[in-house]
Image (cartoon, rainbow, N blue to C red):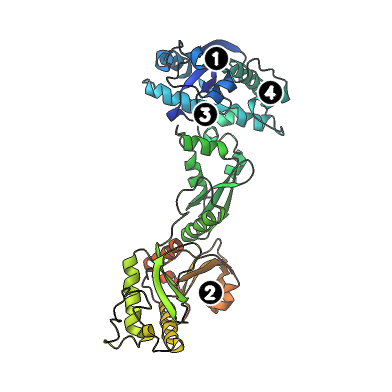
Amino acid sequence: MYAIVDIETTGGHASANGITEIAILIHNGKEVIEQFRSLINPGIPIPIYIQSLTGINNEMVSVAPRFNEVARQIYDLLYDKIFVAHNVNFDFSFLHYHLAAAGFHLQSKKLCTVRLSRKIIPGLASYSLGRLCTEVGIEISERHRAMGDAEATSKLFSMLLEKDIDGHINKTLNPRSKEQSLPPHLPKEDMDKLPPVSGIYYFHNNKSKVIYVGKARNIKKRVTSHFANNKPGKQKQEFLRDIHHISFQECGTELMAFILEAIEIKRLWPAYNRSLKRFEHAYGLYSFDDQNGYLRLAVDKRNKFSKPIYTFNRILDGHVLIKSLIADFNLCPKLCFVQRNNEPCISINEQICKKACEQLESPESYNERVQNALSNLRSALPGFMVIDDGRNLDERSCILMEEGQFYGMGYIPADIIDKDTSDLKKHLTQYPSNDYIKNLIFNYSLRFPLKIRSKSTSISTEIPDV
């Protein structure tokens, strides 16, 4: 037995909206044998645009029963039936949520006439209820009213039962099938193509724009988990409705998947990704020439228009570093903004500063020491490769760090691992570096030192704060 359901609501997600009308048609596989219809008082005002769409206004529902007053009758009609609707997860999420609030736990097998129509009547321009019914010659008596849409869905379902020569309905009802949990517009073929390997995956909307990027140790398992529940919140419901297609990229290792996810989120800026969009250290070490030709060093807040030499989570870390450069290379604390008052330079008496702040040392002489300090700082940053599993036995994955910066990554033939770095670079894709990626790689290098290859004869595995 099937319960063909349609509801009208005050909005698109159950947790903050109410039901204004419900229609249930009990279908025995051949015809409708019972029906139920009722306006529902949602307990909240109906938005004007919803009133315009459905024709249901606040006055009409003011004398209608509250949902909890008819919850028992609705549950008794649904609990032992197969739940059928056009975009079934929308209707089911509302009824599951509001029945639970009334003390009833609805657990039903589900069939979505959107998904079934795509399989049984393929090739149509649209599978919205109105356009689909027009295509197949089904008349809708009251569009956007519960009973009118439910009757049209019932006629469509009867047609699908008749045309289902390949058994798609029974396959969907198979307990091992997860198809009924998929978003209404997502082809099952996209799920079938997903591999059980490390990588990243992309959710696309109806215009093929990427709306979400995720990483996974097992792409197929992770994507399936997105659809394992049907939470009634706005974000989840809008997210599911927007997914029309899935694509993916395999990665040799989980670390590469983490890195590629961060790169793609920065590049594509997907609407439903919240994390990793703005992960950057807050402070940086900068250099610039002043009006007198002296090369200045400064620790300042990061901004997107400048490229720091070094980065820090805390401004204190920046001050510690710049003070060590002053002491080691005889730099002026005033020209490095460590001393900001108008008093004489504190380092002149200590014979650290050579009076560049008083312009008694030439810019050329002072700048040479600043450049030496910066060169020493860059050379202290580690350069190494992470060599790990590839996507198959004939290749290895390679992640390259140069002077503490992420250069890029890719896959190299297994027989050229010991070649010079310049040869390996031909097989790598260069990517932009950021603090999140650098921290990932530095932490990984400490956890798995046997996977690290130095670019030279030695390698530092100390993690700098960059």
Q: Is residue 426 left or right of residue 377?
A: right
In the rendered image, the vertical position of residue 236 relative to residue 83, given as above or below: below
As helix, strand or loop, the secondary structure at mark 1 comes to: strand
| Label located before the other in sequence (4 or 3) | 3
As helix, strand or loop, the secondary structure at mark 3 comes to: helix
Q: Kindly identify the amino acid type of the residue bearing the numbered disc 3.
A: Phe
Q: Residue 182 location, x and y as percent?
A: 54, 36
Front-most of 319 and 395? 319
Marks 2 and 1: which is nearer the front? 1
Marks 3 and 1: which is nearer the front? 3
Q: Are marks 2 and 1 in contact (CB under 8 Å)?
A: no
Residue shown at 63%/40% (left/top)?
A: 206
| Label located before the other in sequence (4 or 1) | 1
Quarter of image, res 73: top left
Residue shown at 46%/21% (left/top)?
A: 45
Q: Mark 3 — residue?
A: 90
Residue situated furthest front in the rendering: 342
Q: Kindly identify the amino acid type of the residue bearing the numbered disc 4.
A: Cys
Q: Mark 4 — residue?
A: 133
Q: Residue 273 location, x and y as percent?
A: 49, 48
Q: Mark 2 — residue?
A: 417
| Label located before the other in sequence (3 or 2) | 3
The 10 Å Cα crowd at callout 1, few under 14, some 14 to 19, many 20 or more, is many
User: Marks 2/1: CA distance?
Assistant: 67 Å
Quadrant into which the N terminus falls:
top right
Marks 3 and 2: which is nearer the front? 3
